[in-house]
Image (tube, grey):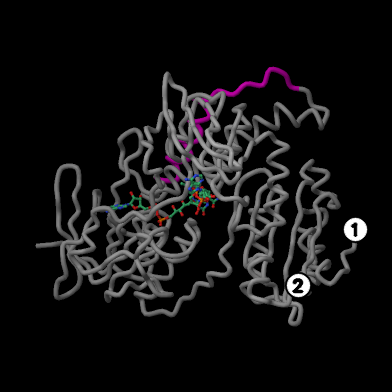
């Protein structure tokens, strides 16, 4: 007889594993199907985020930042160090240990919450009287399982250029770019999005000569343009070369050198040679061999599974979350949807405010925002007022030698409600949380302006930006 569960989750990335744990907390019998294998050939939970995404990239970014500090910035403090070297194998070993700790941590959480991990590839086989039947193809056996509720959380994979094969040695996607065994002398990147900028910064700090080729004519189009302009200025100063409005025509590899032919500003046949090439042109939803057709579910023109505000598909009891559905491809968005679906199944009335999902780009300075950009609000003909405050006028930022950047706060001109907060600063990833809380509670800029912030701290800039909305910043 098939094993029956109240809930089956397909995929154990941040969307799926959180959904499984929350459903188990709510008393459901839960199984989670996951097939990911790490480079050592071991099955691993955690999805893209833990294995080849958020966590390993931040581990390597931290190593590269430490290297750059030691080699370039410590002398500002009167500290001399010479002959700074990086051992790449040790850097990766540190990253791998962090990934291992985190993925093993999810195995522990599954055991603690009695979530059964079904190891293998999951696909729908058909509907039954009580729900859905799913086949799990493991290494040495295939089993059939059933559930009334199924949560599809199969995530995404790197988009490819149609004419180019990624070998993950010379031409790499995120997986290869997080595993280079040496620092490339010359590194080319196609796509100046989040991955291109983070991984470009990482290898530049370690000594690579990095050139990023971007097809769009504007830089960081989804961010507020004030931040994008400041970021472009900072990255240029750091030596990251970014060419916009580029069209790639040919890529070839000969004797471990990759040659990229492209046109730029109407000049054809420009040539870039590099030791390695990262392709980071976005990600595509993962619906391969899911058997969706067996239950009458289709994907839309972009490959996503259509869902409503509660992540319900058109089929009763079938939900989809994370990178496989509309909205930003972010781990915390996937997690929130995982929690939401488990609570919907439990009959609760959870809620996600998609306008309050923060974005962070982990470059230096970091770039973070929540809510709408000035351009979006102008396009909506909103009557707005804006306050900006620079970190150069903040004592803590100066003391820490991290005074680049600013906070830009946008509020409704009539009601003063916060509509968007945009930060470019050393620790924007943490600072943005205050703005998220404020916007979730529909705070006015004056609310932030009246809250006592610790001195000296970067967070004082948040208060000053709020004061600046009403043209009454104090320290400038
Ligand atoms: P995934 O994490 O992709 O997990 C899906 C899982 O489903 C995988 O483990 C896969 O093996 C499994 N699966 C798929 N099909 C099947 C099947 N048929 N049967 C069984 N299992 C299956 N986001 C952030 O918010 N912050 C960051 O700093 C950040 N950094 C990133 C850095 C990089 C380099 C990359 C590539 C991404 C980064 N992201 C970041 C994005 C983030 O990783 C994704 O948004 C997030 O992982 C999506 O979660 P998910 O659960 O939807 O899918
Ligand atoms: P992206 O969507 O951020 O950027 C892709 C870039 O490639 C775009 O600027 C696009 O215009 C450009 N592009 C597309 N086709 C091109 C072509 N043929 N030639 C040149 N340029 C081209 O995608 P990216 O960087 O691959 O990251 C994927 C997703 O992963 C992100 O959108 C984000 O959701 C997630 N992510 C999040 C991170 C974070 O939260 N800090 C970090 C890394 C990834």
Rendering coords of residue 408 (x, y %)? 74, 61
Residue at image position (70%, 36%) is 238
Identify the residue at the far bottom of this view.
Answer: 414
- Magenta stretch contains residue 97: yes
Mark 2 in CB contact with mark 1 (< 8 angstroms): no
Q: Quadrant of residue 297?
A: bottom left
Checking the image for residue 387, the label placed there is none
Residue segment shown in magenta: 81-103
Instruction: Give the camera-side residue of 218 and 277.
Output: 218
Residue 280 appears in view: yes
Q: Quadrant of residue 407?
A: bottom right
Magenta segment, principal secondary structure? helix
The answer to whether residue 343 is above or below residue 157 is below
| Quadrant the N terminus occupies | bottom left
Residue at image position (68%, 57%) is 225
- Measure how far apart labels 2 and 1 are at the Cα level: 18 Å
Identify the residue at the far left of this view.
Answer: 1
- Disc 1 element: loop
Give whichever of discs 2 and 1 has the lower sequence position: 2
| Quadrant the C terminus occupies | bottom right
- The residue wearing badge 1 is 476
Rendering coords of residue 167 (x, y %)? 37, 32
- Disc 2 element: helix
Crowd class of label 2 (few under 14; some 14 to 19; many from 20; radius 10 Å): many
Rendering coords of residue 449 (x, y %)? 80, 70
Checking the image for residue 445, the label placed there is 2
């Amino acid at each position: 007889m098939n094993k029956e569960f109240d809930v089956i989750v397909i995929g154990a990335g941040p969307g799926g594993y959180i959904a499984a744990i929350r459903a188990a907390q709510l008393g459901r019998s839960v199984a989670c199907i996951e097939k990911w294998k790490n480079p050592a050939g071991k099955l691993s939970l955690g999805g893209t985020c833990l294995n080849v995404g958020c966590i390993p990239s931040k581990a390597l970014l931290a190593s590269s930042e430490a290297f750059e500090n030691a080699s370039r910035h410590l002398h500002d403090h009167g500290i001399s160090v010479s002959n700074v070297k990086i051992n790449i194998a040790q850097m990766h070993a540190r990253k791998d240990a962090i990934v291992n700790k985190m993925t093993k941590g999810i195995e522990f959480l599954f055991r603690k919450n009695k979530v059964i991990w079904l190891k293998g590839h999951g696909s729908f086989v058909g509907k039954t009287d009580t729900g859905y039947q799913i086949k799990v193809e493991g290494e040495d056996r295939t089993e059939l399982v059933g559930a009334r509720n199924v949560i599809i959380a199969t995530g995404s994979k790197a988009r490819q250029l149609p004419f180019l094969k990624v070998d993950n040695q010379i031409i790499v996607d995120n997986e290869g770019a997080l595993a280079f065994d040496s620092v490339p002398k010359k590194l080319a990147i196609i796509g100046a999005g989040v991955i291109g900028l983070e991984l470009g910064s990482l290898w530049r700090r370690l000594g690579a000569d990095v050139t990023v080729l971007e097809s769009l004519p504007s830089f960081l189009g989804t961010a507020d343009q004030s931040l994008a302009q400041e970021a472009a200025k900072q990255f240029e100063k750091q030596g990251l070369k970014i060419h916009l409005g580029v069209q790639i025509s040919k890529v070839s590899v000969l004797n471990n050198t990759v040659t990229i032919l492209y046109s730029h500003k109407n000049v054809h046949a420009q040539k870039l040679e590099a030791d390695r090439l990262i392709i980071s042109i976005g990600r595509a939803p993962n619906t391969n061999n899911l058997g969706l057709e067996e239950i009458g579910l289709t994907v839309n023109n972009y490959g996503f599974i259509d869902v409503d505000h509660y992540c319900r598909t058109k089929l009763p009891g079938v939900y989809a979350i994370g990178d496989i559905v509309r909205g930003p491809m972010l781990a915390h968005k996937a997690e929130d949807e995982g929690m939401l679906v488990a609570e919907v199944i439990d009959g609760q009335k959870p809620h996600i405010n998609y306008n309050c999902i923060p974005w962070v780009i982990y470059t230096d300075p970091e770039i973070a925002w929540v809510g709408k950009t000035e351009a979006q609000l102008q396009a909506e003909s909103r009557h707005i007022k804006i306050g900006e405050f620079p970190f150069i006028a903040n004592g803590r930022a100066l003391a820490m030698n991290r005074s680049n950047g600013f906070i830009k706060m946008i509020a409704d001109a009539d009601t003063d409600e916060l509509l968007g907060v945009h930060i470019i600063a050393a620790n924007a990833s943490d600072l943005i949380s205050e703005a998220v809380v404020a916007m979730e509670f529909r705070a006015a800029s004056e609310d932030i302006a009246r809250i006592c912030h610790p001195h000296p701290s970067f967070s004082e800039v948040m208060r000053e930006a709020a004061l600046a909305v009403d043209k009454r910043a104090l320290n400038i």
